Image: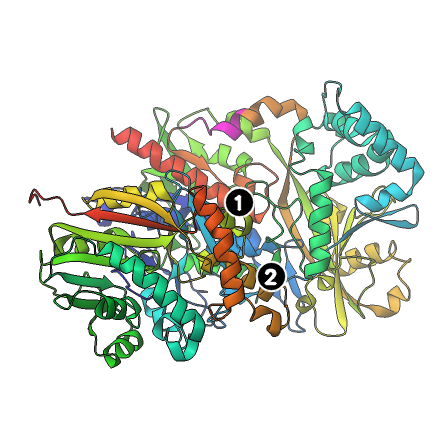
Amino acid sequence: MAVQQANPAGRVPLTGVSGTPVRGTAPPDLPPADRSNGLELAHVACCICGAEDCVPIGIGEDFEYRTSPDTFIAMRCRQCGLVYLDPRPTPTELPRIYPPNYHAFDFSAERFGFVYRVRRALEGRRALQWCRGLPEDARILDVGCGDGFHLRLLRDFGRPGWVIEGVDASVRAVDAARHANLVVHHGTVEQLDLPPASYDLVLLIATIEHVDDPLGVLRAVRRLLRPGGRVVIVTDNTATLDFAMFGGRHWGGYHFPRHFNLFNRATLQQLGEMADLEVDSVQTVVSPVNWVYSVRNTLVDWGAPPWIVERFSLRAPVALAVFTIVDTAHQMAGAGALLRMVLRRPDSNHA
Amino acid sequence: MPESAHAQPPVIVVGAGLAGLTAAAFLRRRGIPVRVCEAGPKIAGLAATHVDAQGFSYDFGAHFITNRLAAAIGVSADCRPVTHYGEMVRLGGRTYGYPFGLMRDPHFLLSGLGARVGHWSPPPADSAADVFRSRYGAALADEIAIPLLESWAGARATDLAPAVAGVLNHSIGHTVLLKINSRLRHRAIAIGYCHEMPETRYVWHVYPVGGVSLLCKRLAQELESCVDLETPVDQILVDQGRVVGVRAKGRELAAAAVVSTAPVHILARMVSGTDALQPMARFRYRPMVFANLRFTGRGHLPDTMLWTPGAGAPFFRLTETPLSMPWLAPPGHTLITADLGCEVGDAIWQSSDEELGERCLEHLDWIPNVRARYRGCRVVRSAVAYPVFLREYEADRQAFAQSTGVAGLYSVGRNGEFAHWLMEDVYWRALSAMRRLIRDQVDLAA
């Protein structure tokens, strides 16, 4: 759950406008830069279909970290159904919206205790599933690796011959990961000069929803993959009951203002195909996190006392357990809280 | 025009109010060259706010926007939430909550219930008066809805088209739920405010620091070097049914399309080279005078807005905006805005600020010590405050609502659409119109 900020190509920030000025004079009463404390925001089009034809479906705030006083809008594209944040913070605001106490920078046993150990056991099993069939000397890249949680899993539970690397745009995350003796490249997968056609597996775990240009990221990832190499994407699912119940404001998956694009099966699959990757599988996965945070955000918004709010967090085993059961029921109906898509770079070496 | 000799001509937007700037900013984001021509010396149009030396703020009437509009434009961090909003009706010396408080009176309750029963098979409506009578029953219609409509529109309800009554887009049950939420949350949830997007319990009123013009200022930041102030467009040039340019300050400028925010009767006169807009030249707007009366103390009205039908007063509505937005008046003071329908040049229109203040005071004697508390009046006038849906041109109005009838000419905004849209509607509708413009341009190129 970390930052892999893509190049904001084609965006026009609200200040410092590019584009095609025609002629004329600037209005004389443009305000001074007197914004109380709001973020610099920019408008975007749908990253799947390019349309700017959207309707507002969710209105919320940064209930979790309160990094700014802004109100944010989740839009749904009328053409393809993608849910996206518009307007959204410009790249210069990333250090502000990912504060030093951001959970993905330090998901440690010391801070998260029992929940950490359970998650480690569960995710360890999942991670090894993704790696099934990899050669002894496989090269694996975790894009948006945060503090290296999944890298550590692969190192501890995987084959000794595997070469494991991570990428993250956040200095804090990279520092935390390097502290654990992990190989982590600082930057974005588009900007970094990583060796092309050399990775067997690329992971994008809770990353694709954070980036401004998911297609750009997937295309960059494709270049890094060996022919036949695979990408595993795990991201929030908008075709769920929790989204239907809380999508007007408090849905945990909005994670305002850090989740820029939110997918359902169809839009995620479309994204993969646009990046010229073959879709191996798209499935839903059980996760209690969006449920827990939907409840938490509701409580925060209604001004509930902290001792109740704290019963619903990543450090609250009871709530996590209860909603794991709830989401397991939904998973049986094919609507688990997360989506997992496995993509493959085609063997035939075109483009 | 050497500067655009070898470039694609821009889309020219006439008017730098909320609608014009929304349209221009959207086009520019899509990489389409735009140029905004504003006749006045400032941006913001009807969304302008005046703040006087004592700290009183004056808008063109009471303005409420929503958190959704503020967030869509990107100014939410500079907005304050409105915690309360309520309406009441003053009738025969009594005040009633609006709308449900009226039901306390058996006379109105029977009228309303009778109408609900008959509502399943309403008789055909020829006028706004018919619609109100079938929707609310005779008592509510004749004593409240019709007198209000008539002073507001300056025409007989029997001469107004049924469309003026609008469409009820929410049920009574939904309204009650929103009102309960409003109370519990301590937020003025927007009810009956936006027609383009759904009403939800998460959409409430906010007010930008420094006034609603902040919305326009933010949009104008995206339009640096594209806005020409003091550049009135005299003519919109049409050739063979298609817009080709405008004439402004004596110069002809080529245009790929023109987006007008001008009042429609003025637009009809601006367009040359076609008669397509001639029927719209007779569309009427109701001029309105807003008398802003300053008082010491606060809470002189029973709620933020008070409807005053048929009491013989020159105004039909009073608004004490500081009850919802305390910052609009300095501490210990308040501002009551009286809306007075009039005609340009008539006695009300020509009254001085003092005369008009005095005239309103005569009808506010039910406020205790009203004269001792009175601290003067400031008047804001608008010659085109509300479109008047007269039956005589209803067919033309409906045709105009579909299209201007001229290829490449789009009319947006409250005045430009000749419709009763509120600010959030204006925003979403301007975006829709610009999507249509882009589609049309693509079709044209193909």
* Residue located at (39% from left, 27% from top): B273
Q: Is residue A171 above or below residue A332?
A: below
Instruction: Give the image location of residue B296, x and y in percent.
Output: 80, 71
Q: Are marks 1 and 2 in contact (CB under 8 Å)?
A: no
The percent coordinates of residue B333 (x first, y second) are 76, 71
Q: Is residue A11 above or below residue A156?
A: above
The image quadrant where one finds the C terminus of chain A is top left
Q: Residues within 10 Å of mark 1 (few under 14, many from 20)?
A: many
Q: Can you tell which mark lies on residue A193?
A: none
Determine if the magenta segment contains residue B410: no
Frontmost residue, A338 versus B402 = A338
Image quadrant where residue B373 sits: bottom right
Which is nearer the eye, A337 or B355?
Answer: A337
Quarter the N terminus of chain A occupies: bottom left
> What amino acid is at disc 1?
Val
Q: Residue at x 12, y 61 (%)?
A: A138
Q: How far apart in space, not on screen, are marks 1 and 2 (Cα)?
A: 17 Å
The secondary element bearing badge 1 is classed as: helix
Side of A236 relative to A199 (left or right): right
Q: Which residue range is magenta in the image?
A: B399-406
Task: State which tag comes first along the sequence, 1 or 2.
Answer: 2
Amino acid type at mark 2: Tyr
Q: Name the residue at the left extreme.
A: A349
Q: Is residue A195 left or right of residue B126?
A: left
- Subunit bearing disc 2: B
Q: Which residue is mark 1?
A: B426
Q: Which residue is mark 2?
A: B207
Which chain is disc 1 placed on? B
Q: Position of residue A55 (x, y in %)?
A: 47, 44
